[in-house]
Image: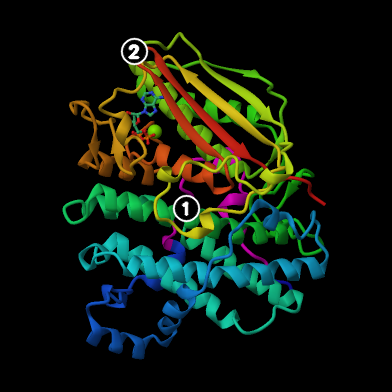
Amino acid sequence: MRRTIARPLRFMPRAVQRFNCGPRASSTLHHLKDASVAHHRPQTHHHRDRDHERRRPESDVVPHLARQPLHPLSLADLVKHGRPPLGAEALLASARFTLSLLPIRLAHRIQALRNLPYIVVSNPNISKIYNNYQASLSTLLPWQGRTISNLEDEIRFTEVLAELVQTHTDTIPILARGFLECRKYISPAEVTRFLDEHLRARIGTRLVAEQHIALHFSSTPHFDPAASPTPCPEHPSYIGVIDTALRPASTVDSCGGFVADICELNYGVRPQWIVDGEPDTTFAFVPMHLEYIITELLKNAFRATVENGMSREPVVITIAPEPPEVKPPQQQGQVHLKPPKESRGAFDRDAIAPLDDNAPGVTIRIRDRGGGIGSDVLPHIWSYSFTTFSESDDVPGGSWGSDDALSVISAANNGSSSIAGLGYGLPLSRAYAEYFGGGIAVQSLHGWGTDVYLRLKGVGKIE
Ligand code: ADP
Ligand code: MG
């Protein structure tokens, strides 16, 4: 019997999916509606723990799985199964590799959520995320201890992955709302520490799942165009979700158009931008990560430019390729692009991927004339939830989470995009950039403007 798998959001045309949170996860969450706070296992409630374990024996595995080390994910891991279309053996190997990583990764997240203060995990939004993780882990557990050895298994496993990716689509706005509602009980620093670890780990988990799903769809004869309402154009340069010939200048132009549209809606002004440097540079990277980062950085640059009354000054984006490094032998293996220690929280070890020092990369400088970032604001820009954006426009300086931010989340849930307001743009962009060994640095020239340096490392030689 031929099975079909609903193509997840990521495989819709990028122009459609960008900043649209996609189909609400609720359709896939109906079975979780009754999930209650009782599913939490805060360490102080031992009697409840025992009841809970009797009801849900699979939760026993969480501490065990969470003690296992995380596999540090690299771009090379994701392309190691070869170029699609994959043969049956390579596709099965990819499925098995994916299965070997995911339960441990989910268990680490569940454990981290359990370690939050009880009153925070009891918040309906945070507990929804917790329950999503529990549910996703329980869909994978039956697969552990058996081998995915035929294509029928692989199809069923890919269905489970597609469901998992879909279930966790809205994690960020839900967590953002949850932590805003809990801001009396947890400090901004604690929120940032938790989110930094959680969202970095989430990047890898989604990527592992999405990579296998994409390989599945692009590997004939299993590829079934009828399975999806949106045809997936064949990209010869793609290996799963990685574009081996990604051209950042094209990403800048398409994201620039999108952000300029939002500006036009919000301010009635359409800022201009120029791409210079070496716009024809290409490298191997994950397009959806680059799109996220560029969109957030352009939102900041455009907003500052408009609010500073400089809309006639274009934002200038300079693309500079970074050639593979030639290093003296004693330096081999040293990490060059690794960001400074203090920029990283105590997040999962998986976010420090082994770097391929010989991989080509690219540096993108985004230069605006938006007046720069004040010294009162600058120390806080990397904190989740810090923003100087206010819908009522009467908040001097900046703030951590406000009711305005809640309305920004509500607006986002209705499909409209905001230029700013959640305070997640910079920290999350940095998490994406650092995931594979890049980084983001911000340089403000007071009264003049801001330079943001985005460095990304691609993947080296691909078989
Ligand atoms: P948000 O845009 O939602 O406020 P971000 O994390 O993107 O959150 O940015 C945090 C803050 O940093 C912004 O509110 C703004 O005050 C400041 N900022 C970021 N980029 C720029 C820029 N290019 N020019 C001026 N200020 C900026
Ligand atoms: Mg922003």
Q: Which residues are magenta?
A: 4-26
Left or right: residue 62 compared with residue 244: left
Q: Secondary structure at mark 2?
A: loop
Q: Which residue is mark 1?
A: 200
Q: Is residue 205 above or below residue 262?
A: below
Q: Secondary structure at mark 1?
A: helix
Q: Position of residue 213 (x, y in %)?
A: 65, 60
- For ligand 1, the image quadrant comes to top left
Q: Position of residue 85 (x, y in %)?
A: 81, 57
Looking at the rendering, which quadrant does residue 280 occupy?
Answer: top right
Looking at the rendering, which quadrant does residue 211 occupy?
Answer: bottom right
Left or right: residue 302 compared with residue 4: left
Residue 433 on the magenta segment: no
Q: Residue at x 53, y 26 (%)?
A: 256
- Type of amino acid under label 2: Gly
- Confirm whether residue 62 shows in the render: yes
Q: Which residue is mark 2?
A: 447
**Prevailing secondary structure class for the magenta stretch in the rendered image:** loop
Residue 8 on the magenta segment: yes
